[in-house]
Amino acid sequence: MKHFYSVIFFLGLVSGCAQEQQEVGETNDLATESTQVEEASDSAGGFYESERIIEFMLCDEGSDYTDDAMRALIDDWNTAIDVMDNRVIASYGLRPKYETEMFDGIWTLVWPDMETRDAGWEAWPENGGKALREKYETVLTCQSETTYLYSGHTIAAPSSIWEGEPHFVSYHFCSFNEGVVGEDVQPVETKIAGWIEQYRQTNADDGMALNGLTPLFDSRNPDDEIDDFDGVGMWGYRSVDDANKFAEAWAESDIQAEIDKVVSCKEYDFDMYIFRLPEA
């Protein structure tokens, strides 16, 4: 399940999941923050209104890993990112809520575009990457040489600032049903967005968000050891309680039946921790 990573929030059934090996600069380090901001207005309006590049790195805890050491790493990483010209616009970490031997967590980087991403990785080793790797290599190591890239778009932005951590995210890895093509999924996504808008009329502070991800690699590679997918979606929630409340209303609607007509999905749940928020 190497590609179940990442993050901002998405239920993009028009997207895809799997993996691709992407060579990036040398570094075992992580990137900036991402997550929720007030109503996609003021501080992060542009962030939620535009597409972005989302990059996932699989990470393992080292012998000196502690919560305090990890926080120190994130703080030093943010300090290094702050002075870079080509930098990530957000970042968050994911810890699986299921058993896996493939990784301990995922470091997610959110970039404004591919050009910035490529330039940022090229400059990173000499702009903090080497130093951070040497300082924290016994705390956390991340597979920066093999990352997973997606194009992400917002379906439903957070309606409020989320306090407290961890947050809860659920990634849906979906395959088109027989006879279904990508164009058939777009109307369903539009229905989902409309349903969420109606839900928010009586649940203004709903504590949820939704994004769609499209893989920038061959998600149906016959040589890949991972199961194939045509689409991946991510639901993000401020808390498990918010997720349960949303699920109760969802279950009373017929929207899931609409989704089941076009795709079949598997769900993978994570705790999410914010490393870097979009700049105001």
Image: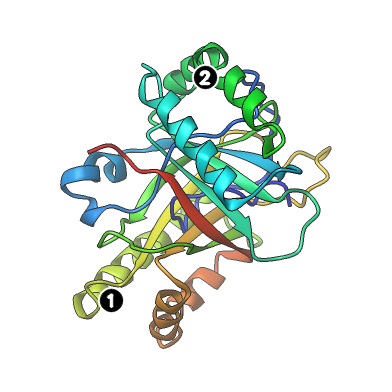
Q: In the rendering, which numbered label is found on residue 199?
A: 1
Query: Which quarter of the rendering shows the C terminus?
Result: top left
Looking at numbered disc 1 in the image, what kind of residue is underneath it?
A: Tyr
Whether residue 14 is visible here, answered yes or no, is yes
Mark 1 element type: helix
Corner quadrant of residue 62: top right
* Picture coordinates of residue 42, whole percent (x, y): 15, 46
Corner quadrant of residue 86: top left
Mark 2 element type: loop
Q: Is residue 196 left or right of residue 41?
A: right
Q: Is residue 241 left or right of residue 266?
A: left
The mark that comes first in sequence, 1 or 2, is 2
- Farthest residue to the left: give it: 42
Looking at numbered disc 2 in the image, what kind of residue is underneath it?
A: Gly
Residue underneath mark 2:
128
Figure check: 271 above or below 25? below
Q: Residues within 10 Å of mark 2 (few under 14, many from 20)?
A: some
What residue sits 58% from the left and 57% below the top?
180
Q: What colouring does the structure picture have?
A: rainbow
* Picture coordinates of residue 272, whole percent (x, y): 51, 57
* Picture coordinates of residue 163, whole percent (x, y): 33, 63
Figure check: 18 above or below 100? above
What residue sits 50% from the left and 51% below the top?
14
